[in-house]
Image (cartoon, rainbow, N blue to C red):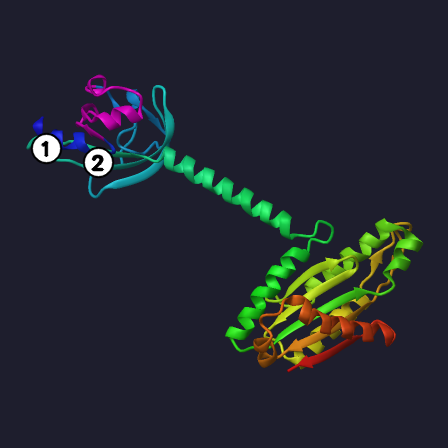
Amino acid sequence: MDAYQIFNEFLDGVFIFNESKEVVYCNEIGATIFGTRPKRAIGKKAFEIFKIQNDSLFCTENGAEGKEGPSHYVEVPYQGKDTQGLVQIMVRPCPIYPNEQHWLCYFHNVTEEQSLSSKYRVEAEEKAKAHNLATTDAMTGLRNFRSFTLQIADEMKISVSEKESLGLVIVDVDKFKKFNDTYGHQQGDEVLKVVATTLRDSVRKADFVARYGGEEFVVILPKTNLEGIKMVCEKMRSNIEAAKVKNLADPSGTLSVTASFGAVCIGYDFLKSNLDKDYKFFLEYSDKNLYQAKEGGRNQSVVSNLE
């Protein structure tokens, strides 16, 4: 019928079925989706042209839905003569003849879209995986030194823009060389893993913990004042002291470990005046406080203000 010619310009497949579920019209796109030709489709049942995973849809052999009322819409896998993929189907009554019922089936092939989506998802996952490997310390699972340098630069800018103080803590495992010399490097690695986990579990989600190198760690505490930093340092210190490290040479025994903390509370005004400085400028103050903690007997924290 000439009335069907408008469907020839559609970019999606269009089939029209009669009461017997026979194809009375098929446009070129529809035929291509299922690997046939329009003339070959005429007079055939839908299920002779394609197989779809939906037993209730009108155009399937035993289907019923979509014959009456509003449009029926599904997205299902399909199998054609030499093709397969994913198709979105809309079935709705299509009164063309006064005394005969017909149904219009509209097919939108999303196979390529799905393939591209999967491709982009895989690429995004691979990119995220590569970024994670590049910014994570393999032994402890914490962020690494490179990640810290990027994070501290961002946190400094955010603190200035929000007029907030910023806490910067450096942590050093006490007498770490003794663990390596006495128990071996594998035992030393176990100590670092326990300390790393304890530090991460002792702070807020908004805080940032990274392995700085060797037996040193750094912690960034956004929006934290002097008293808050002292409290966090004490929490981290006491949690490490209470932690038990598995003794690799004696599975029934454990080892104890402590750490020293040097921290600064970088006030908004001081940070704003020195925003052109890199992280090393601020970390030197933390390092000086760490030295005092070590000289004072270890297993303690020294915190000061930068205003």
Over which residues does the magenta segment extend? 14-43
At a point 88% along the width and 58% down the height, the residue shown is 177
Q: Residues within 10 Å of mark 1 (few under 14, many from 20)?
A: some
Name the residue at the right extreme: 182
At a point 56% along the width and 65% down the height, the residue shown is 154
Left of 216 or right of it: where is 166?
A: left
**Magenta region includes residue 17:** yes
- SS state under label 2: loop
Mark 1 and mark 2: Cα distance apart in space? 14 Å
Residue matched to label 1 = 96
Where residue 156 appears, as percent x and y from the top left, is: 58, 70
Where residue 204 appears, as percent x and y from the top left, is: 63, 68
- Amino acid at circle 1: Ile
**Magenta region includes residue 29:** yes
Q: Residues within 10 Å of mark 2 (few under 14, many from 20)?
A: many
Left of 12 or right of it: where is 180?
A: right
Q: Quadrant of residue 299?
A: bottom right
Left of 123 or right of it: where is 257?
A: right
- Amino acid at circle 2: Lys
Name the residue at the front extreme: 276
Can see residue 235?
no
**Residue 229 in the image: above or below residue 200:** below
At a point 25% along the width and 27% down the height, the residue shown is 30
Q: Quadrant of the C terminus?
A: bottom right
Where residue 264 appears, as percent x and y from the top left, is: 69, 76
Can see residue 190?
yes
